[in-house]
Image (cartoon, grey):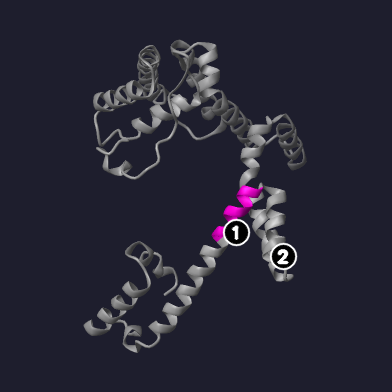
Amino acid sequence: MFSFVKSMQGTQADGAANQTGDTLKIDIELRRMFDYFLAAIGEKSLPDIRLEIEIELDKTLSRPAAAQGKEVLARYLSYKQDLVELEKAPGLTGSGAKAMKLRLQGMQNMRSRYFSQNENTAMFGADDIYDTDAVARFEISEDKTLSEAQKTSKYHALDAAMPNALREEKEAPYKILRLAENVSKLRQQGASEDEIYRMRAANTSPEAAARLAALDVDEAQWKNRIAVYLQERKQLPEIEQKNPAPSASSELQILRDKNFSRAEQMRLAAYE
């Protein structure tokens, strides 16, 4: 997909167009598919990108569902074009909580002109929940009439009202950090790889624990290869000079080529 756009070569396409029977499924995945293609603006014209999306819809969906997809696409493109103008409106260009809230309200009002309530919820509902929560927190942070204790109380109220899906999304990075910290502590205490696997599986899933174990093996092998390379590198003293002789530079490159692929060599600077 999108091989004619250089910046997207080798990327994984985001989103998807799905159907139930011959009826298009209008959801966030469809919107993400549109946005994936539209990210090529600047490399390709909008008409070219629109044509490519329509070709993808024809390949993926039945004829009735593809026709529905093209109709939704037309409305989505009109909405996006109007959104550019909306963001230039006076009062909406600032970075404060008030401007953020007005932009969100303006965007929601504009969408109602192009999409039904059900379509709005399906395509943008998750983003609206996230953005509304973010604006509310920003308003609290900017409110100079509140004490720190009052702000904390309001933040806790927002946390309590947060949908589970949003809470899990916000907590995910911290869970990963806590898991990594626990693994480090277990290793320091002499825990076996089996014990580490079981701890990870209990906190994630057996499949995730297995993937993390495989990453541990890859990381250990990488560190071992780096250690061998650095030891061999010490046998080339000339390269430690600011302006090494051409022969020394050649020997260093030969050493790199012996131990690492070209792609891997891009990571070596962090170890040298």
Q: Is residue 132 above or below residue 249?
A: above
Identify the residue position indicated by label 1 in the image. Answer: 213
Q: Which mark is residue 186?
A: 2
Q: In which quarter of the view is residue 235 placed? A: bottom left
Q: Amino acid at mark 1?
A: Ala
Q: Determine which quarter of the picture holds residue 57.
A: top left
- Quarter occupied by residue 81: top left
Rendered image: mark on residue 137 = none
* As drawn, 226 above or below 193: below
Judge whether residue 242 can be spotted in this image: yes
Magenta stretch prevailing secondary structure:
helix
Q: Which residues are magenta?
A: 206-215
Q: Nearer the viewer, mark 2 or mark 1?
A: 1
Visible residue check, residue 245: no
Mark 2 falls on what kind of element?
helix
Residue 2: image x %, image y %? 30, 36
Question: Where is residue 231 drawn, in percent x and y?
Answer: 44, 83
Quarter of the image that includes the C terminus: bottom left
Quick one: label 2 or label 1, which is nearer the N terminus? 2
Q: Secondary structure at mark 1?
A: helix
- In the image, 241 versus 98, the foreground residue is 241
Q: Position of residue 140 (x, y in %)?
A: 66, 34
Identified at 27% across, 43% down, the residue is 6
Amino acid type shown at disc 2: Leu
